[in-house]
Image: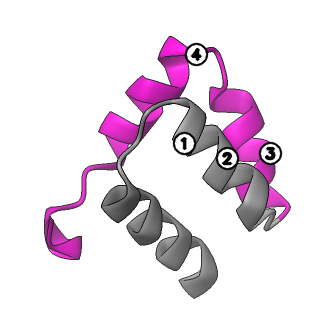
């Protein structure tokens, strides 16, 4: 996946399936990269997408 093709909604949908959207946003807001990574893994997000999300977190 190219970063320009990234669709954050898909990540949020997977997090919603496990009831962890708010926890994910808390992790992002507090720059807790490890918690964000673990939540995405638990939700079944693929590693390439996780890498993109973490890069976007570090860029902001």
- Asked if residue 29 is positioned above or below residue 3 in the image, the reply reads above
Q: Which residues are magenta?
A: 1-30
Residue at image coords 58%, 15%? 18
Q: Please, is residue 43 above or below residue 46 in the view?
A: above
Q: Alpha-carbon distance for marks 3 and 4?
A: 15 Å
Q: Residues within 10 Å of mark 4 (few under 14, many from 20)?
A: few
Disc 2 crowd, CA 10 A, few/some/many (<14, 14-19, 20+): some
**Disc 3 or 4, which lies upstream in sequence?**
4
On whether residue 53 falls in the magenta region, the answer is no
Secondary structure category for the residue under label 1: helix
Residue beneath disc 2: 38
Report x, y in % for residue 29. 78, 58
Earlier sequence position, callout 4 versus callout 2: 4
Q: Which residue is mark 3?
A: 26
Marks 3,4: beta carbons within 8 A: no
Task: Select label 1 or label 4 by which is in front.
Answer: 1
Q: CA distance from mark 3 to mark 2?
A: 13 Å
Element type where label 2 sits in the image: helix
Q: Which residue is mark 1?
A: 41
Q: Which residue position holds label 4? A: 18
Mark-to-mark CA distance, 2 and 1: 5 Å
Q: Is residue 50 left or right of residue 20?
A: left
Residue 21: percent from left, percent from top: 62, 29
- For the residues labelled 3 and 2, say whether their Cβ atoms are less than 8 Å apart: no
Mark 3 or mark 1: whose residue is earlier in sequence: 3
Q: Which one is in front, 43 or 11?
A: 43
Neighbor class of circle 1 (other Cα within 10 Å; few <14, some 14-19, many 20+) is some
């Amino acid at each position: 996946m190219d970063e320009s093709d990234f669709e954050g909604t898909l990540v949020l949908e997977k997090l919603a399936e496990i009831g962890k959207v708010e926890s994910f946003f808390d992790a992002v807001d507090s720059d807790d990269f490890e918690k964000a990574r673990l939540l995405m893994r638990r939700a079944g997000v693929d590693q390439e997408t996780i890498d993109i999300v973490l890069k976007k977190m570090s860029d902001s």
